[in-house]
Image: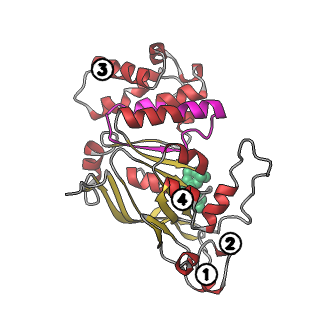
Amino acid sequence: MTSSPMLRVSDLRLSYSTAKGDLPAVDGVSFSIQAGEALGLVGESGAGKSSLALALMRVLPRNVAHHSGVVELEGVDCTGMDDETFRRQIRWSKMAMVFQGAMESLNPVVRVGEQVIEPMLVQGHVAKKEAAREARRLLEVVRLPAEAYDRYPHELSGGMKQRVLIAMALILKPRLLILDEPTSALDVTVQAQIMDQLKDLKKEMDLTILFITHDIALASDVCDTIGVMYAGKIAELGPAERVLRSPSHPYTRLLLASVPRLHQEEQPGFIPGSPPDMVSLPLGCRFHPRCPFVFQRCIAEEPSLLAAGQNHQARCWLVEQRP
Ligand SMILES: Nc1ncnc2c1ncn2[C@@H]1O[C@H](COP(=O)(O)OP(=O)(O)OP(=O)(O)O)[C@@H](O)[C@H]1O
Ligand SMILES: [Mg+2]
């Protein structure tokens, strides 16, 4: 018997109502993550990465027009769960998240330790003293000095604040951690330290990770699987090794070519054009206006995710034409 994946997402859809019409930010996304593994969700700004994460956590903006799809955690379907049950049984305790830009939303007048224990106190059933003990332990786990507990956010560096947020997300011992651009505001050295830390956490705490970033090289550092998102859809999904070494979607190839490399003479390339207007999407393949390999069929018909190898799929007609 094979066990259920830690997270299985099927046909997730989320659209916003805007003055220009409905905007399908997440448009039929499916993937799963096995326990103890990390999936990297990569793509340019506006691809729908954060919207997808917010939908998983059920923290949705008010102007959501449509939200559907199935989300299963360890084989349990959370879809039909009412919001109160989801808040009590799932959010923070089974699935937690470090939100994009959350460093800026730490409360400047509350000591960081008090903020770390907040999810625990909200959940109830625990004395503050016990919560504080757990928070100090976690600060140590994320390699912060114990005194950090009594500091205010402005007394900490960006890297330290990001560690505080990770500790906060881990306080209720979730098995699944979503990190949305956790290092994009940090300089390269601190970024590397946080990535090392995540790799350790994944191993030591047997965490399952959904890592969201626009930086495919960064994702490949910690992730077993990579999902490339373009204009609300998965463009390519497969084992990290495969996606990096033999990318099947032209968009993935351009993303990889745009990564600056150390010790390389060539200038990194850039991706021509810009992502589509999400309210009036191009017909056919959403990437076709920017694709160097576009041909007639791409303009007329949108490809589904096609098999590009074992556990590897790409939404591109060229995949079908390969022998
Ligand atoms: N509350 C909202 N109302 C209307 N449109 C929204 C809302 N939030 C996001 N969008 C739009 O939905 C699309 C997806 O946005 P989202 O923030 O999910 O992308 P992202 O991949 O996380 O981008 P980034 O890399 O910049 O964080 C974009 O076109 C964005 O403008
Ligand atoms: Mg985002």
Tell me if I can see residue 106 in this picture.
no
Label 4 sits on a secondary structure element that is helix
Q: Nearer the viewer, residue 213 or 4?
A: 4
Q: Marks 3 and 2: in contact by CB < 8 Å?
A: no
- Residue ID for mark 4: 243
Residue type for callout 2: Cys
- Residue ID for mark 3: 128
Q: Which residues are magenta?
A: 165-194
Q: Residue at x 54, y 43 (%)?
A: 221
Inter-mark Cα distance, 4 to 1: 22 Å
Residue 124: quarter of image: top left
First in sequence: mark 4 vs mark 3? 3
Residue type for callout 3: Lys
- Residue ID for mark 2: 291
Residue at the far left: name it.
1
Residue at the far top: name it.
147
Inter-mark Cα distance, 4 to 3: 46 Å
Label 1 sits on a secondary structure element that is helix
Q: Residues within 10 Å of mark 4 (few under 14, many from 20)?
A: many
- Residue ID for mark 1: 298
Residue 224 position, x and y percent, is 45, 49
Q: Residues within 10 Å of mark 3 (few under 14, many from 20)?
A: some
